[in-house]
Amino acid sequence: GADDYLAKPFEIAELEARIRAQLRRVHRQADPVVAFGDLSFDSRTRLFALRAAELALTPREYAVLEQLLLKSGRTVSKAQLSQSVFGFEDEADPSAIEIYVHRVRKKLEGSNVRIVTLRGLGYLLRHED
C-alpha cells in the first residue's frame, strides 16, 4: 500500500522532503533483539542466546521456545504448542510436547528464565529478578 501521496503539480523540494521523511521512518525500526531475563532472541538471525552465548536448539525445541517468548506473560496451551511444533501432523503424541518442554527447561537451567506449568491450562515463560 501507499504510505504517502503527492498531487501534481508538485515542487521537487516537497518530493525530496517526503522521501527523506520516509527514509527516517524506515531506519527508526524497532530493535530486532528481544530480551527476556537472561534469554535474548535476534529476529534477524533467528537465534536464541542465553547470557550472550548461543543456545543450541533442535527445530522443535526452537518452536516451543519461540512460541513461549512471543507470548511471554501469557499462558500457551499444549494445543497451541503442538500446532507450532508439529503443524498438522495427526500422529503427534500429546505427551511429545511435554518432552520438548522438558528439554528446553534443561537448556535454560542456571538462568533466571523458567517455563512454568499451569495445570490444565498450559505453559508460561517467566523470568525471576
Image (cartoon, rainbow, N blue to C red):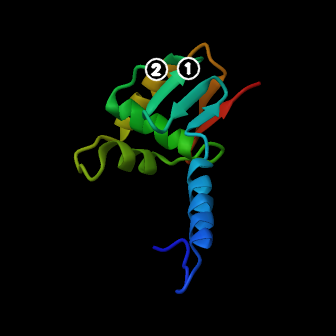
Badge 2 is on which residue?
A: 55
Q: Is residue 31 above or below residue 48?
A: below
| Percent x, y of residue 65 | 48, 34
SS for callout 1: strand
Q: Are marks 2 and 1 in contact (CB under 8 Å)?
A: yes
Label 1 packing within 10 angstroms: few (<14), some (14-19), many (20+): many
Amino acid type of the residue tagged 2 in the rendering = Leu
Left or right side of 38 for 91: left
Residue in view at x 39 percent, y 30 percent: 61
Residue in view at x 38 percent, y 47 percent: 84
Badge 1 is on which residue?
A: 50
For the question of whether residue 123 can be seen, the reply is: no
- Quadrant where the image shows the C terminus: top right
Amino acid type of the residue tagged 1 in the rendering = Leu
Q: CA distance from mark 2 to mark 1?
A: 6 Å
SS for callout 2: loop
| Percent x, y of residue 12 | 56, 72
For the question of whether residue 74 can be seen, the reply is: yes
